[in-house]
């Protein structure tokens, strides 16, 4: 395909997959159950954090997390105290367990009460064309409180060469416009042009087959390379093509 043909192909696939039916089998359905901005943010963040492995399992365990938080994430986080830690006993999603859950709730409480919330951290540390340094600063803020070393692995850091797929997916949810019925467009202080594609094995394989990505590893350098390729097609909203890459990989076995 020529560059123009490839753009037309990706545009059509992105438009095809970005619609409310996408939600039915995707973890994004969890934050869609809420209407308050802070509830959507916290539900989306925690869901994204455990979004690896089987999608049915991800959704089921994200639902469990919401129930443990009385289906009121923001109220639960801001009022969380030591005598509530036991509610997470027995919770586990792959290597994310009750200890990690308590640490994340306490870190979110610190961020919302002391630092103005998740959006403020990202917008304060955003760069004109990327949020990857802001993800690094989020991790610094997140682990200011005492914590177990094991929990750090659950928050990726692009400055340590991670693709940070789950956080980039969360950012897509928060920033991209809600017009397609999937993302929320909640964070007006950040533009879609600053987003990076959530790179995983599926989107990476499709991107390589389409000539959008040459690097073999799915790491932060590959994210930058893919971002540059996608911005050639839409500099204002390059991450809309995440839908095309994901759909082609998951549903069409491209």
Image: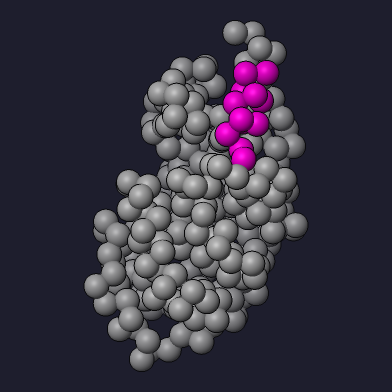
Considering depth in this image, is 34 or 172 the residue closer to the camera?
34
Q: Farthest top residue?
A: 1
Task: Name the residue: 49% across, 81% down.
Answer: 76
The quarter of the image holding the N terminus is: top right
| Of residues 29 and 98, the one drawn nearer to the viewer in this rendering | 29
Q: Position of residue 68 (x, y in %)?
A: 39, 76
- Residue drawn at x 51%, y 54% is 29
Image vertical order of residue 5 relative to residue 183, above or below: above
Q: Toward which corner of the image does residue 137 lie, by quadrant? A: bottom right
The vertical placement of 140 against 250, above or below, is below
Q: Which quadrant would the C terminus be assigned to in this image?
A: top left
Which image quadrant for residue 200? Answer: top left
Q: Which residues are magenta?
A: 8-19
Q: Is residue 91 magenta?
A: no
Confirm whether the magenta stretch covers residue 14.
yes
> Viewer-proximal residue, 34 or 96?
34
Identify the residue at image location x=61%, y=23%: 10
Residue 79 locus on image (x, y percent): 51, 87
- On the question of residue 16 being in view, the answer is yes
- The location of residue 73, given as percent across then percent down, is 51, 74
Q: Nearer the viewer, residue 105 or 47?
A: 47
Is there any visible trace of residue 155 in the rendered image?
no
Q: Tell how many labels.
A: 0
């Amino acid at each position: 395909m020529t560059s123009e043909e490839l753009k037309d192909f990706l545009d059509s696939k992105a438009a095809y997959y970005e619609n409310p039916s996408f939600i039915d089998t995707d973890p994004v359905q969890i934050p869609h159950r809420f209407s308050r901005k802070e509830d959507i943010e916290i539900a989306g963040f925690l869901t994204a954090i455990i979004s690896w492995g089987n999608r049915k399992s991800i959704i089921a365990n994200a639902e469990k997390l919401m129930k443990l938080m009385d289906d009121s994430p923001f109220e639960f986080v801001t009022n969380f105290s030591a005598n509530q830690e036991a509610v997470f006993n027995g919770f586990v999603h792959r290597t994310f367990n009750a200890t990690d859950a308590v640490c994340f709730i306490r870190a979110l409480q610190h961020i919302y009460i002391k630092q103005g919330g998740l959006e403020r951290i990202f917008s304060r540390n955003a760069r004109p064309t990327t949020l990857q340094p802001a993800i690094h600063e989020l991790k610094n803020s997140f682990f200011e409180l005492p914590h177990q070393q094991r929990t750090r692995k659950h928050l990726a850091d692009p400055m340590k060469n991670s693709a940070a797929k789950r956080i980039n997916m969360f950012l897509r949810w928060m920033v991209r416009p809600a017009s397609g019925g999937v993302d929320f467009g909640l964070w007006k202080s950040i533009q879609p042009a600053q987003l990076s594609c959530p790179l995983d094995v599926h989107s990476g394989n499709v991107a390589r087959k389409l000539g959008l990505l040459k690097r073999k590893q799915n790491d932060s350098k590959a994210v930058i390379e893919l971002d540059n390729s996608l911005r050639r097609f839409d500099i204002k909203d390059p991450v809309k093509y995440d839908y095309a890459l994901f759909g082609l990989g998951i549903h069409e076995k491209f």
